[in-house]
Image (tube, rainbow, N blue to C red):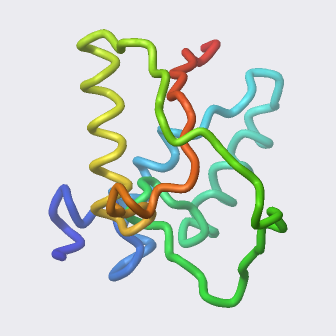
Amino acid sequence: TDPDTEEGTWTWHTKAFNPKRIASIQKMIQVGEDLTPEQHKQVHNLISEFADTFAATVKEVHLVDFKSFKLNVPPEAVFPIKVNQQPLTLPQCKFLYSRLNELTESGIIHHIAAEDVRAVGSTVLAQKAH
């Protein structure tokens, strides 16, 4: 990816300190109004200094192999495998499917065969307060 293109702005894989990327991150972070101008500048300087620690999109999140967890679920436990999903509106469907596609393309989630499903739950889309 060319770090000087729009797509390259959003990746720290090749150039974490790309000024366009830093500017985008600065825009995403809300800094409180109660800070002095000097404190405000310090916050923005810290964001610039540690720009490589921010993930602007899920595509920038790396999977780790050094951390795992195990669910201690008894083998005899039974979970629902039929979804009782309330119908989603068209805007909700578009939003949900775009997020699922983004997570799939990023390798965070993946499709499984229907016979491998062991538990399901309804999807509830919650609106953010702000």
Q: Which residue lies most toward the front here?
A: 76
Viewer-side residue, 125 vs 122: 122
The total of numbered circles placed on residues is 0
Q: Say which residue appears at 44% left-offset and 13% top-offset.
A: 86
Quadrant of the image for the N terminus? bottom left
Residue 114, above or below 62: above
Q: Say which residue appears at 51% left-offset and 60% top-offset.
A: 55
Quadrant of the image for the C terminus? top right
Relative image position of residue 32 (x, y in whole percent): 74, 27
Residue 121, above or below 62: above
- Quadrant for residue 45, please give it: bottom right
Q: Say which residue appears at 42% left-offset and 50% top-offset.
A: 23
Relative image position of residue 122 (x, y in whole percent): 53, 28
Viewer-side residue, 90 vs 57: 90
Relative image position of residue 90 (x, y in whole percent): 24, 13
Residue 97, above or below 102: above
Residue 2, above or below 71: below
Viewer-side residue, 14 vs 78: 78
Viewer-side residue, 72 vs 3: 72
Q: Say which residue appears at 24% left-offset and 72% top-offset.
A: 3
Relative image position of residue 29 (x, y in whole percent): 59, 39
